Amino acid sequence: MPISVRGTLVVTRKRGRKGEFNIGDLCTEIGEFEVKDALIEEFEPGKYTGEFVIKWIEPDSFSWRGKVFVKVRANLEAIYIDEADETPDAAQTALPPEPDPADPTPPRDERAATVEAVDQGSPSAARRPRAAPADEPAPDDQALFGAELYPLLEQRQAMKLDPTIDRMQFRQQRDRLKALGYTFDVKSQTWSSDVPV
């Protein structure tokens, strides 16, 4: 049975093999929990205060550099934000890399994945020149958003994404909306655009 608690969620953005993803640390009166739900994929890094509906709580673990990290994970059913401070917490960047929630199993070469994850966050990684992206075809918005959301996209109307779909598709929808000039309102959890049709 879901329970509703007040708390503060600190969202940080990580980079994995499949792109960027969000991890949250939820602090409530009943305890502190890690959050890896698709519900927070749309949020910008920062601190969010409000009401959180927790479906279940369970232990979660991963290994990094010969150590095992065990956390208590909360799975959220809904989020109702009162206050948002979308300023990333610099202290969070020093934490060990987290496995991507879209990865059902850890990578085969854990050492290589760890080096890649640490490399991405290192100061030298920012100075390293990146390869120029290859010419990619324009995304097929109709296939990406489906019959329900695509008409809203064509008319540049406000829309709410469904976090229960495939996580990678959900991230692609989020990234496509950003590319098209949509902005995310964290309180209504709705995307809207000021760009005319």
Image: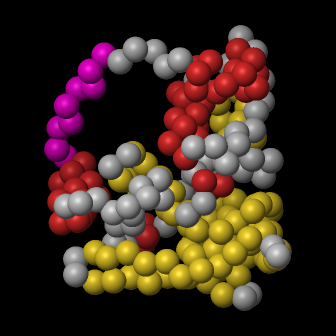
The image quadrant of residue 114 is: bottom left
- Measured as percent of width and height from the top left, residue 65 is found at 22, 77
Q: Residue at x 43, y 49 (%)?
A: 20
- Measured as percent of width and height from the top left, residue 86 is found at 60, 56
- Measured as percent of width and height from the top left, residue 96 is found at 34, 72
Q: Residue at x 70, y 66 (%)?
A: 76
Q: How many dots with numbers?
A: 0
Query: On the rendered image, what quadrant is the C terminus found in?
Result: top right
Looking at the image, residue 190 sits to the left or right of residue 23; the answer is right
Q: Is any atom of residue 87 visible in this view?
A: no
Query: On the rendered image, what quadrant is the N terminus found in?
Result: bottom right
Q: Is residue 132 magenta?
A: yes
State the residue lying farthest toward the top: 197
The image quadrant of residue 141 is: top right
Q: Residue at x 27, y 25 (%)?
A: 133
Looking at the image, residue 26 sits to the left or right of residue 106; the answer is right
Q: Nearer the viewer, residue 185 or 70?
A: 70
Q: Magenta-highlighted stretch: main secondary structure? A: loop
Q: Nearer the viewer, residue 44 or 99?
A: 99
Give the residues in magenta: 127-135
Q: Is residue 9 magenta?
A: no
Q: Residue at x 76, y 33 (%)?
A: 159
Looking at the image, residue 149 sits to the left or right of residue 36; the answer is right
